[in-house]
Amino acid sequence: MSFKINNRRYTGSKTKLVPWIKEVIEENCLDCKSFCDIFAGTGVVTYGLIDNFDEFIINDFLYSNEVIYEGFFGKGNYDKEKINRISKRYNNIDLNTVEPDFVTKNYGGKYFSNEDALKIDYIRNDIEKKKNKINKKEYNILLASLIYSFDRCANTVGHYDAYIKSKTVRSSFTFELIEPILESTDTQVVKIYREDANELAKRIYADVVYIDPPYSSRQYSRFYHVIEIITKWDKPQLFGAALKPEAENVSEYSKSRALDFFQDLISSLDTKYIVVSYNNTYNSKSKSSKNKMTLEDIKETLSKKGETKMYFKNHKAFNAGKTEFNNHKELLFVTKVK
């Protein structure tokens, strides 16, 4: 088995909506060669449109997502036999020879079983040791594969805001490789960024810009802190019951001034078409789930940029918490820029 890019649990993932998003873009965005996914998250929208455009820009501010994009989309040759040999060895680790490191000491028996935590420690350290012996593509494939592998066995509800305390943590870790989407012979050009979307918008051009920012007060850097730490391997001090580091990469789109930042983003874009995903959780009773921008805010902002159409689809969103969303609808705005 190998992981495809959509084989993750991720809050707000558009995996099931990609065919619909693709259909709307194909219907409205004509004679376009370049596409930008400026809040790319899992990267599944770019993946779904990979045969529709010649050039892509994919951006997200999480370190782990950048590594995942490099592993799946990054150009460059890699030695498949070497990668497979390494993968096989990672599934035959003698745990008696492994020294507990950051994952075992902090997350063992909590986010992961102690046995799985030891395996993750060994593999993460080994990938880092190999950094000078493997190329960039191979490094990112191995690290992205580790992320997908441990995410599957994590003792969580799908994000890392907390671990599940009322159960015995079972060992189930198996190292599996990701399946890269682009090979070095493919013609598509993919530029990968890890930047603030508003700053990046001032420097790039794409015929179509797809926008799916966080709309609620939930911070993705806090939801996925375990993945971020293992990716960066900087071993920070942790705090609280959920064992989180000090806050970083805090999104302004999850704060009270979200509309100001959205308006700045839209005004900065150099593009033919803007496509914005939105949903009707603005009616949620949960403060953390409630959207920071209203439907009217977005319509008004986009209409100033050009003629705007709105599409909607009934959709049961991925919800790892206890918040109930009745009559959940996913919306797409398509703006033809003046």
Image: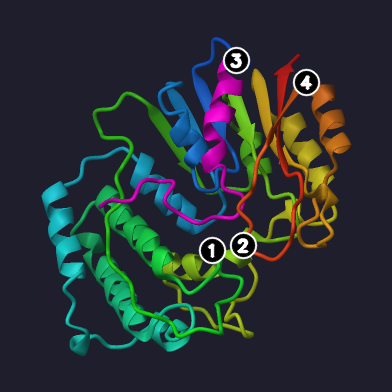
Give, as a single range, the part of the protein colored magenta: 1-26
Sequence-first tag of 1 and 3: 3
**Cβ atoms at labels 2 and 1 below 8 Å apart:** yes
| Residue 59 appears anywhere in the view | yes
> For the view shown, which residue lies furthest in the front direction?
327
The mark found on residue 320 in the picture is 2
Mark-to-mark CA distance, 4 and 1: 35 Å
* Residue mark closest to the camera, 4 vs 3: 3
Q: Amino acid at mark 2?
A: Ala
Q: Secondary structure at mark 1?
A: loop
Residue 165 or 250: which is nearer the viewer?
165
Q: Secondary structure at mark 2?
A: loop
Q: Is 235 placed above or below 2 here?
A: below
Nearest to N terminus: mark 2 or mark 1: 1
Q: Which mark is residue 220?
A: none
25 is within the stretch colored magenta: yes
The foreground one among 15 and 137 is 15
Q: Residue furthest top?
A: 31
Q: To which residue does mark 3 refer?
A: 27
Q: Is residue 167 magenta?
A: no
Residue 75, given in percent of the width and then of the height, sits at 31, 37
Q: Nearer the viewer, mark 2 or mark 4?
A: 2
Q: Tell me which amino acid carries mark 1.
A: Gly
* Residue labelled with disc 4: 308
On-image quarter of the C terminus: top right
User: Against 19, is 227 above or below?
Assistant: below
Q: Does residue 268 appear to the left or right of 165 in the view shown?
A: right
Q: Earlier in the sequence, mark 4 or mark 1?
A: 1
Q: CA distance from mark 1 to mark 3?
A: 34 Å
At 55% from the left edge and 17% from the top edge, which residue is drawn?
26
